[in-house]
Amino acid sequence: MKKAISIIAAVAMATTMLAACGGGGKTESSSAAASGSESASETMAAGGETGMVANKDKPLVWYNRQPSNSSTGELDKEALHFNDKTYYVGFDANQGAELQGEMIVEYIKKHAAEIDKNGDGTIGYVLAIGDIGHNDSIARTRGVRKALGTAVEKDGAIDSTPAGTNVDGMATVVKDGEIEVDGKTYKVRELASQEMKNAAGATWDAATAGNGISTWASSFGDQIDIVASNNDGMGMSMFNAWSKEKGVPTFGYDANSDAVAAIPEGYGGTISQHADVQAYLTLRVLRNCLTAWMSTRASARRMRQAMFSPQQTTSMCRKTDPTTR
C-alpha cells in the first residue's frame, strides 16, 4: 500500500500536472501550466541528466469536471488539447444532463394524475441551480428544460439562466412546455429557479436550497408538483425541508448514499456519475503516465551506456587528465 501511494505521489509531483477543474472564464489550471512552461523550459534540462521535464511537455490529467468557459459552459478546447499527453477522466456532462431530464419525464408520464394534486392541468416544477458558471450545472439545467419542453434558445444554445419567479409564465428564459399522458395534455411550467449561492459566495449550497424551497412553498406551494436539482446535496436539503412531508417527488444528481436511501421515502431519483470508477481510472492514467516516463528514462540511460562503455569512459578520462602520463 505504501509503495502504491508513493508511486501515485511521484506521478503527481514529478511527471504529471493533475487538475480538478475550477471556475473561471479561462481555465485556471490550463493558464497556470501555460504561463509556467516558458520559464520551466529555461530552467529545466528537459530530458537531460536531471530528469526534469518542462511543464509544456508534461502529461496533463483533467478529472471529474471538463475544463470550460465559466460564462458559456463551452468546453475549453485549448485546455483539453494542452499537449499530446492531455487526458480527461470523468462523466459526459451533456449525456448525464439528458438522462436526468428523461428520468423526470418518465416519472411524470407514469404518475401524472397523482402528481397534479390541485388538478389544474399544469405540472409545475422548481429548479435548484448549483453554479451558473459551472459547465455541469449549465448542462443539467439545459437537460431538464429540454426534456420538459420549457427550453428557450439563446445564441444557438439552450438558455440556462435562472428564471427567478415565473408563476405567471412570463419569464423570457423559459417557456411553457407540454406533456401528453393517456390522451390528456398537461402544461409544464418552470415556476421558479435560482442559483443556490450563500452570503459568503459558496455555490451549490444545500442550506440555501433548503431555505429556497421554503420560500417557494410559502408563495405557491400547491402549484409545485416536481422539485428538480442540479445535485443531490441541494435536492436532499429541499426534500427534507419540504417535499418529503408534502409527497412531492424530488430529483437530483450524483447518487449520493443518502439520496439513494431516500428513494423508498419519496425521493424521485438521481443520476450516478460512478465516482469510484472515476477515481480508479484517474489513478490508472497517472500510473500509465509514470510507467511511460520511467520507460523513457530507462531507454535514455541505456543509450548513454551504449555510447560510452566503461572502458571508453576510462580511456577518455586518461587522455584529458593532465596528471595522467
Image: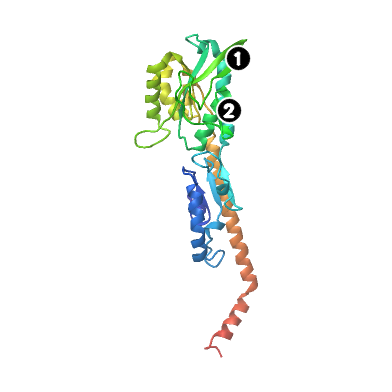
Secondary structure category for the residue under label 1: strand
Q: Amino acid at mark 2?
A: Leu
Q: Find disc 1 in the rendering and name its residue.
A: 180
Location of residue 295 by image quarter: bottom right
Q: Residues within 10 Å of mark 2 (few under 14, many from 20)?
A: some
141 or 324, nearer to the observer: 141
Badge number at residue 99: 2
Residue 288 higher or lower than 165, as above or below = below
Residue 44 higher or lower than 79, as above or below = below
Tell me if I can see residue 19 in this picture: yes
| Coloration mode | rainbow
Q: Earlier in the sequence, mark 2 or mark 1?
A: 2
The mark lying in front, picked from 2 and 1, is: 1
Where does residue 188 sit, x and y in percent of width and height? 53, 18
From the image, which quarter does the C terminus lie in?
A: bottom right
Location of residue 145 by image quarter: top right
170 or 143, nearer to the observer: 170
Where does residue 74 sit, x and y in percent of width and height? 55, 40
Please indicate whether residue 109 sits to the left or right of residue 229 in the image: right
Q: Residue furthest top?
A: 119
The tally of labels here is: 2
Where does residue 239 sit, x and y in percent of width and height? 43, 22
Badge number at residue 243: none
Secondary structure category for the residue under label 2: helix
For the residues labelled 2 and 1, the Cα–Cα distance comes to: 20 Å
Where does residue 217 sit, x and y in percent of width and height? 40, 18
User: Do labels 2 and 1 touch, CB within 8 Å?
Assistant: no
Residue located 58% across and 29% down the image: 98
303 or 162, nearer to the observer: 162
Q: Amino acid at mark 1?
A: Glu
Residue located 38% across and 29% down the image: 208
